[in-house]
Image (cartoon, grey):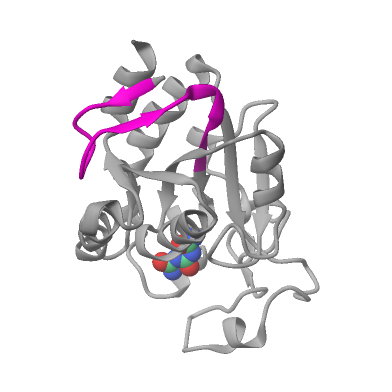
Amino acid sequence: MSRIDDAQPFAYEFTPSRTAVVVIDMQRDFLEPGGFGETLGNDVSLLAPAIEGTARLLNAARHAGLLIIHTRECHKPDLSDCPPAKRTRGAPTLRIGDPGPMGRILIAGEPGSDIIPALAAHPGEIVIDKPGKGAFHATGLDALLRSRRITHLLFAGVTTEVCVQTTMREANDRGYECLLVEDATDSYFPAFKQAVLQMVRAQSAIVGWTASSTQIAAALSE
Ligand code: TIU
């Protein structure tokens, strides 16, 4: 049993063999210029700080032998899994499926949908493509976790209040004990990140816990 005494709002205990790291959508389409995030009008440089914390988390998790899952938000080339409401909303400079500097925007197999090189999946790690914001929607994630007897999830990735928070809430409702890694997630809206951290741990961990990648690494090395 590992334990983070000073997790918020109170200590978080987890058994490493029953714990998975879930890295949400650390893709070029969100973190690099010319991708989906920028087409929506965002400053993508705001997500860069999360790379270091995510790398620290992955390094500690790999050494400890945790199950590691990466997700990618992307759609089939024929857009059959992209609801028109998602594609047509608002006035982005490019829409999902349109050609951009990193290939077609948010389409599986295009360079933009790749995980950024610094955080690429290692051989044997699981990569799940997902059409929604939440990673449980229209994927086999829940069945995969249950087949591995996973009960605890450590979340990293982008963006904090969109895909990360949605997935964490989906997981919490499915009975997983969830922790959001504070320095391994970022938002295009820094105030939203801080709000999510507070929302998650309020009301006696109504959605889950938060702690830093350094605290997790320390707990895993004890
Ligand atoms: N726009 C935004 O903040 N996020 C997304 O569209 N997807 C994810 O968060 N991955």
Q: Quadrant of the N terminus?
A: top left
Residue at the image position 19 percent from the left and 31 percent from the top: 6
Percent across and percent down for residue 189 are: 26, 65
168, above or below 58, in the image: below
Where 99 sits versus 121, above or below?
below
Residue 134 is at least partly visible in this image: yes
Residue 152, position as x, y percentages in the image: 48, 38
**Which residue does the image show at 37% across and 21% down from the upper left?**
2
Image quarter of residue 75: bottom right
Q: Count the marks: how many? A: 0
Residue 54 is left or right of residue 125, and the answer is left
Magenta range is: 2-22
Q: Quadrant of residue 74?
A: bottom right
Q: Is residue 179 left or right of residue 17?
A: left
| Residue at (32% x, 24% y) in the render | 3
- Residue 72 horizontal side relative to residue 175, left or right: right
Q: Quadrant of residue 199?
A: bottom left
- Seen as rendered, the residue at the extreme top is 222
* Residue 177 in the figure: left or right of residue 86: left
> Which residue is more in the foreground, 206 or 49?
206
Relative to the observer, which residue lies in front, 130 or 153? 153
Q: Is residue 184 a member of the stretch shown in magenta?
A: no
Residue at coordinates 51% horizontally, 67% vertically from top-left? 36
> In the picture shown, does residue 24 fall above or below 62?
below
Is residue 32 in view?
no
Magenta span contains residue 8:
yes
Q: Nearer the viewer, residue 89 or 213?
A: 213
Residue 176 in the image: state x and y as whole percent: 49, 47
* The C terminus, quarter of image: top left
